[in-house]
Amino acid sequence: MADHPPTQWARNPLATAIVGFTGGLLIAYAIGVWQRHVALAERDAAHGVVLGAKDVQIAEARAQVAAVQRTLAAAETRSALLRARIALLLAANDLDQRNFGIASERLKVASESMALVDASALGLDPSSVIAMRDQIAGTTITLDRDLGAQRQSVLELAARLEGLGGAR
């Protein structure tokens, strides 16, 4: 075998050590970058799962809010129907006591309460609610000695209002 002359690197161990050390640093740096990339990818995947879960929770919360809003609308409509019915019954009572002005005011309150009724909130027929509101608004109290017919008319309105289904 032929002897090969020693290379320049073999003659300079310091240069060989520096090159080896630098190569090791580059390899370590590359491994660190790769590990960081893997860790960031795992974190992003975990965040994606968490965000997906939060999106589902937000959608569920919005659905609950919508359900509560429907329930609130139904309760407000029932309340308006009850206020109208109470106003009609109080108007009939006021007629018995010959308080014509107060009875007229109570009819106005009943009509205003009917204007707040959202028929769709309780599944009522909108045309019957409008007709009822118009009939209440069209009812007038007149000064008369025989109040029986007027009282009966107001009580019939209260009974029809109860028959709508929401004034119980």
Image (cartoon, rainbow, N blue to C red):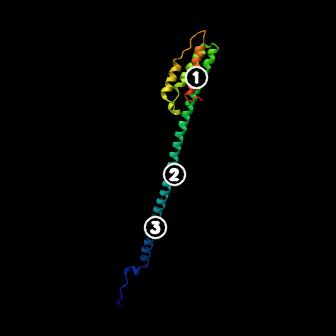
Give the mark nearer the N terminus: 2 vs 1: 2
Q: Along the line of sight, which residue is nearer the eye, 114 or 161?
A: 161
Q: Which residue is mark 1?
A: 158
Q: Mark 2 is on which residue type?
A: Ala
Residue assigned mark 2? 53
Q: Which mark is drawn over residue 89?
A: none
Specify which label sits upstream in the sequence, 3 or 2: 3
| Residues tagged 3 and 2 counted as in contact (Cβ below 8 A) | no
| Distance from the alpha carbon under mark 3 to that under mark 2 | 33 Å
Instruction: Determine the secondary structure under disc 3.
Output: helix
Considering depth in this image, is 33 or 19 the residue closer to the camera? Answer: 33
Question: Which quadrant does the N terminus fall into?
Answer: bottom left
- Name the residue rendered at 51%, 53% in the picture: 50
The type of residue carrying mark 1 is Ala
Q: Quadrant of residue 145?
A: top right
Q: CA distance from mark 3 to mark 1?
A: 84 Å
Residue bearing mark 3: 31
Q: Is residue 63 above or below residue 154?
A: below
Kind of element beneath mark 2: helix
Q: With 49 as the anchor, is 144 left or right in this view? A: right
Rendered position, 33 above or below 49: below
Q: Residues within 10 Å of mark 2 (few under 14, many from 20)?
A: few
- The answer to whether the residues at label 2 and label 1 have Cβ atoms under 8 Å apart is no
Name above or below for residue 49 compared with residue 33: above
Secondary structure at numbered mark 1: helix
Q: Disc 2 to disc 1, how far (Cα)?
A: 51 Å
Task: State the residue in front, 141 or 52.
Answer: 141
